[in-house]
Amino acid sequence: MLATMEGTAKQIKRCGYFLFYYLRSLRGEKKPLLGGIKLTHDCNLSCIHCPFRKRKASSLSFPQVLSSLTTLYDWGVRIIIIEGGEPFLWRDGEHDIRNVVAEAKKLFFSVGVTTNGTFPLEIDSDIVWVSIDGLKETHDRIRGKSFERIMANMESSSHPRLYAHITINSLNWKEVPALVEFLSPKVKGITVQFHYPYQEVEKELFLPSSERRKVLDDLIEMKRQGLPVADSYACLEALKNNQWRCRPWMIASVDPNGKLTHGCYVKDRGEISCERCGFSAHTELSLAYSGVIESILVGSRIFFLK
């Protein structure tokens, strides 16, 4: 009974905040809602589509982590994603990612972790995303030999909200339907995004619009069939031609050098090209702000339902 009352109180608090947030934004207060904190650029894989592995190695100290989390909260962020590099590699003295999650949960409505899945997935975050970019041969070609270890960690994980995340590019797009079918019984849901052409990575990985539309149609059909594609129909449709209205001010980021940024995920990390954007999380967030009910419900299911 007490747990139910506490859960209801949290829901009321969240709903109240989101309503207040929206009303303030209409008055011109453009505050971020979703934040990402990159603990480190260090990684144990060498993914061919990742620009960060080629950048100067750096990591936040634990005091920097605490300061950054507080700043993001003060800015307005209420949903935080802990990422890297590979966040499970991060250490500062006796502190590791579990300490970061514990501190983040004191502040934010929802705490997520994104990982390459090569470490045991026992973590007290609200949600865990594991990056899987193909079936064994394709995934290992893109990310380095790791597929079997990731599958073993996923199968042994007791985390109740384990999601898979696919970055779609010119090497794996034809395999996405088979990958979704393969992953479906193993995870709570599957989200996707499209490779972004950062200057450090191969331009050939970028998927042309005709192929993008084809794979999005495949994902829409699989979602209709009941497979756990978590992105909304509205989001998948909007990504076909990128005609959705972006709300970049809803996002904030922290880099491993301690730099905090309010705005587009690519801001200060690369050349911003809206027509080439494939960041579905930002699409979904912007659609939710625009009043698309389906996107609002998707956000609620992913971040707040147990």
Image (cartoon, rainbow, N blue to C red):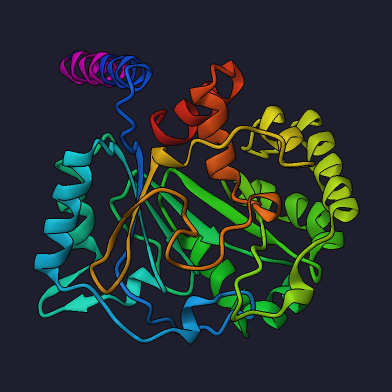
**Nearer to us in this view, 110 or 37:** 37
Which image quarter is the N terminus in? top left
Residue at 37%, 86% in the rendered image? 56
8 is within the stretch colored magenta: yes
Q: Position of residue 199 (x, y in %)?
A: 61, 76
Q: Is 138 drawn above or below residue 2 in the view shown?
A: below
Q: Is residue 242 left or right of residue 216?
A: left
Q: Quadrant of residue 126?
A: top left
**Nearer to us in this view, 167 or 77:** 77
Which image quarter is the C terminus in? top left
Q: Is 267 drawn above or below residue 188 in the view shown?
A: below
Q: Is residue 291 left or right of residue 142?
A: left
Q: Position of residue 162 (x, y in %)?
A: 48, 49
Q: Position of residue 17 (x, y in %)?
A: 26, 20
Residue at 55%, 70% in the rendered image? 150
Residue at 80%, 62% in the rendered image? 207
Q: Is residue 289 left or right of residue 241?
A: left
152 is within the stretch colored magenta: no
Can residue 76 be spotted in the picture?
yes
Q: Position of residue 36 (x, y in %)?
A: 36, 53
Residue at 57%, 59% in the rendered image? 272
Magenta extent: 2-15
Can residue 188 be spotted in the picture?
no
Q: Quadrant of residue 87?
A: bottom left
